[in-house]
Image (cartoon, grey):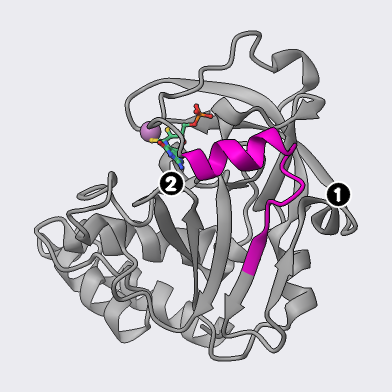
Amino acid sequence: MSNISRRRFVKAGLATTAGVSGLAVAAKLAHRYGLVPPDSGGIFGPGETLTYAAHRIFSQHSLAREFPRNMISKDPFANSIAPLSDGFKRLQSGGFADWRLSVEGMVAQPATLSLSDLKTFPVRSQITEVVCEEGWSYIAEWIGTPLHEVLKSVGVLRQARYLVYFSIEPDWWDSIDMEDALHPQTLLVWAMNDADLPVSFGGPLRLRVPRQLGYKSVKFVTRVMVTDQVKGFVPALDPNSPNYGYSWYAGI
Ligand SMILES: Nc1nc2c(c(=O)[nH]1)N[C@H]1C(S)=C(S)[C@@H](COP(=O)(O)O)O[C@H]1N2
Ligand SMILES: [Mo]
């Protein structure tokens, strides 16, 4: 969205905020300006659309809060995960030397990267909070490769709009828009609090999306795919997904 259409959207939106039907009208405007999340169809649709559009207009480049080192949680909470497959355990017993991240879809040069390949990119470390929709949270230092560095190296095509990312765990995948995919704090994390990322926290590789709720930070990532449409890759709309019914856009 250009700055001009952004401004027009804001103006048009402000003009409607007074009305009772403001929410529906704002949702209509968001449609007109292409700021509609892919799960906008249900009864919460207008609200979902308004949240997403407002975040993208007013805080597109905002940073997730980063904390001082002394606020790192002493006892970070690892949410329970399904039992890991034999395939995973084999990779684990080899020290994850054979772990690969496939980078594919609408890119000029698809790539397959090992953890040591990933570590040749610039490294970013940040102290941010994981917030679960179930009400708990913790703060940790996350160290990894900014996703935008990897995407830059493979050359994202102009028509790209979304990134779909997959865990080695079946049914754990999710998608984000390119603004979050290219955001400086979106990291392919391989270390946490100065040690390799523990398996319980998604090691050897986890996509941290710190501007959104915990469920968007998928553990054990093996594949990222750039695409121009997310149809079929919206957990909110997929009964097989553990995040069925949760908002696609979970900005915090
Ligand atoms: N592959 C995978 N990723 C996952 C999950 C999972 O069960 N499997 N749980 C999600 C949920 S609901 C949350 S809140 C966070 C929990 O992160 P934590 O274990 O670091 O607390 O991971 C998310 N990523
Ligand atoms: Mo969660």
Residue 169 image label: 2
Q: Is residue 29 left or right of residue 52?
A: left
**What is the quadrant of residue 215 in the picture?**
top left
What amino acid is labelled 1 in the image? Val
From the top left corner, tell me how far across and down residue 208 is, in percent.
60, 45
Q: Nearer the viewer, residue 153 or 31?
A: 153
**What is the quadrant of residue 122 in the picture?**
bottom right
Q: Is residue 33 visible?
A: yes
Residue 105 belongs to the span the image colors magenta: no
Density class for disc 1 (Cα within 10 Å; few <14, some 14-19, many ≥20) is: some
At x 54%, y 90%, the residue is 159
At x 49%, y 79%, the residue is 6
Look at the numbered disc 2 and give the secondary structure of its residue: loop
Instruction: Report the residue that reaches farthest toward the top.
Output: 74
Q: Quadrant of ligand 1?
A: top left
Residue 152 image label: none
Density class for disc 2 (Cα within 10 Å; few <14, some 14-19, many ≥20) is: some
At x 33%, y 68%, the residue is 37
Q: Is residue 139 left or right of residue 125?
A: left
Q: Nearer the viewer, residue 148 or 13?
A: 148
Q: Nearer the viewer, residue 123 or 82?
A: 82
Q: Does the beta carbon at disc 2 come under 8 Å from ligand 1?
A: yes
What amino acid is labelled 2 in the image? Glu
Q: Is residue 172 above or below residue 139?
A: below
Look at the numbered disc 1 and give the secondary structure of its residue: loop
For discs 2 and 1, the disc positioned in front in the rendered view: 2
Residue 97 belongs to the span the image colors magenta: yes
What's the CA distance linking mark 2 and mark 1? 26 Å
At x 63%, y 67%, the residue is 102
Judging by the rendered image, the residue that carries numbered circle 1 is 123
Q: Which residues are magenta?
A: 86-102
